[in-house]
Amino acid sequence: MYKIYHLKVGDKGKIKEIKAGKSLKHRMKSFGLYNGVEFEVKNFSLGKRNVELQVGNSLVALRAGEMEKIEIEKLGEER
Amino acid sequence: MQKITAVLAGQPNVGKSMLINAISDAHLKVGNFSGVTVDKSEVEFNYCDEKSCSDYEIHIVDLPGAYSLNNYTIEEKVSKNFLLHDDFDLIVNVVDSTNLERNLLLTSELLELGKKMIVVLNMSDEAKKEGIDIDEKQLSTILGVPVVKTSAKEELGIKELKEEIVKVYKKPFTNGKIIYSDVIEEEIENLVSLLKVKKFDCKVPSCNIPLRNIAIKLLQEDKEIFTLLRKEPMWIELEPILQGGLEHIYIHYNTKDLEEIFDDERIAFARGATLEVTKVEKKEKKPITGKIDDILLNKYFGIPIFLILMWGLFQLTFTLGAIPMDWIDTFFGKLADFSRDIFGNGFMGDLVADGMIAGVGAVAMFLPNIIILFLGIALLETTGYMSRVAFLLDGFFHKFGLHGKSFIPLVTGFGCSVPAYMAARTLKNEKDKLLTLFIIGFMSCGARLPIYVLFTGAFFSQSQAGNMLFLIYIAGAILGLISAKVLNIFVFKGEDEPFVMEMPKYRLPSFKLIYHTVYGQAKSYMKKAGTFILAASMLVWFASNYPKGSDLENSYLGQTGKVTAPFFHPLGMDWKMAVALEAGLAAKEVVVSTLGVLYSVGEVDEQSTDLRSQIKKNIPIPSAIAFIVFVMIYLPCFAASAVFAKEAGGWKYLVYLFVFTTTTAWILSFTSYHIAKGVLGV
């Protein structure tokens, strides 16, 4: 099962499923994070405790706890 | 003259405040939404056309930024509440042109409210630079409401926006056109036709909207609409249609979560609309924000760079700030002398000079600090760096239940708690903010330094005293973090607030915007703290000088000290130390001077060798340690307490803080007294 913290800076991924409660799910949606969305990892903080993602035209930051709730697939594996 | 009320609604970082400044900065009023510490800016001006300026008065209310109307943050709650329950004529929805798709999610929620609306494509200059071209006419056709392109920064399109506001106000209402998928549209149609047949009419603001919007809200299981409609006789006929409709929708979507269904509908709508109206010219250049982030968010350099910036800010705050502080001090000193010349040395003279002027002076003294610090914070926020700070430090602070943004208020607390409490405003989440507010006091402020200097100097050699001082500060900070953890587990219980945060683009700060922010904060500090402090300092003055002709020992304050002495007795303290601590509730600066009076060495400061030797002679080391521990933890001062109550959102929080800090202070003081006694064998 791939999670965002398995990726490296510069990697691209696609959201497969968000396993979160109603309100967090909605919150993520209002930031453009929902199933099928593609993103790029821009930066990790120390120990991958936080991540900065490029989603569409905006940058969104998440904590490890939120990364845990998002199942992703890695894009461009073959590269 | 007709009055038009427009509300400015939009997501955070779309340039709303800049837009309201560009529309009219002459009469900008900054206040709070009732009951919460969320800023509310309003502006009123006369609309001028070719003929005259007296036909319309436009009143614009700026709502706090909200990503969606889902009650997630306090800002979202305030915005939603205002949009549903307040009286206004139209919504001006401000949208970031460079981020249309995500912004349209909120737009589609706003369209569901069934009010007159204008969509403003702000930051159109930036979009142009990024090669994004939006066809506003087509967008207007899709949304069914007028669309205006603006750039608040370049002051483009502002006149057109004002014209559009008047135009929309004059025109009859036409419904915005968010189109859902066929299944939902079908059910909306069924409900609308029944409502139409029954000639449903509602006068309450939250349901005085088009029938289509009532139908949508019914399908979304909106509680308010349900309560209102259930009272109607036609509910009997409405209910089966609604039930059937919902079943139909559930089958189609394979879920019964209506929120999710409508979220997905809005996402599809926003995505479709964006695709249809935008043309993106591919630019090869890496955007500037990404480049800056590569440096500022660097795993190794990010935190050091931030610490250097912070160090610079604090140097400025407390060194540059010290210069005007001296002037203010001198000024109020002169003013006090002057008032004595007028009122004489009697009751009135004392009251005005020692009670009122000294009290207000103490508040005004902090003003330079506050202005410089807030200038710095406003710069961090408007440039977009504040979010990066949160990102960098969140990993560490989250371990204690705090947020990355807690860092700035906490560090400010080492200087002075007053601006620190105010700096906690940058925390948007209620729990994060309260938790931070509660532990700011543990960061020993500058005013406690004289007490530490006096006591460490009395009991330790010159070389050791410095280490002890350092130890006191570090111990305070560690204690603060531990308390945060404890409060997080036992008091502010519940699941951790998620951390989903936008990293706004880096932007050059706007002078106008920063000026308004800093000016507003300085003014509110002077007004709120000023009035309360005036009363409190008069009270303290009275308590320490009366009954008439008594010295401090026999004054009301001294008597209180004696009465409360049993409370301090288990900590190894006598009534003199109790009085000093109680006087310290007003301001920590008073503690040293009170001790001076009580040990009758006259006027003293912390360097006084007389007082030092008196203290060494009269106070055993364990009691002195207990005293220092108590000073480290209990309430900072009146000024800070007043500001705390305001920022936390009520006086009840000050009561909690008082109980929490005093209990902690007492317990730790008691423990350290007995440990010291055991270790030293006295």
Image (tube, grey):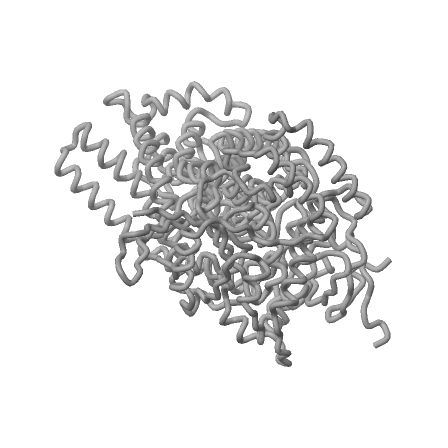
Task: Check the image and report above or below for A55 versus B620.
Answer: below
Which residue is more in the foreground, B602 or B536? B536
Q: How many numbered markers are drawn?
A: 0
Picture coordinates of residue B307, whole percent (x, y): 55, 62
Which residue is more in the foreground, B335 or B286? B286
Picture coordinates of residue B76, whole percent (x, y): 56, 46
Q: Can you tell which quarter of the image residue B192 is in?
A: top right
Quadrant holding the C terminus of chain A = bottom right
Picture coordinates of residue B626, whole percent (x, y): 54, 33
Which residue is more in the foreground, B203 or A14? B203
Q: Can you tell which quarter of the image residue B587 is in?
A: top left
The answer to whether residue B521 of the structure is visible from this angle is: no
Residue at the spot 48% in from the left edge and 54% down from the top edge: B92
Quadrant holding the N terminus of chain A = bottom right
Q: Is residue B24 left or right of residue B331?
A: right
Residue at the spot 32% in from the left edge and 32% down from the top edge: B535
Q: Residue furthest bottom?
A: B284
The answer to whether residue B180 of the structure is visible from this angle is: yes
Task: Check the image and report above or below for B589 versus B304.
Answer: above
Picture coordinates of residue B234, whole percent (x, y): 64, 28
Task: Check the image and report above or below for B14 versus B76.
Answer: below
Q: Can you tell which quarter of the image residue B487 is in?
A: top right
Residue at the spot 61% in from the left edge and 36% down from the top edge: B197
Q: Is residue B386 left or right of residue B516?
A: right
Q: Is residue B504 left or right of residue B560?
A: right
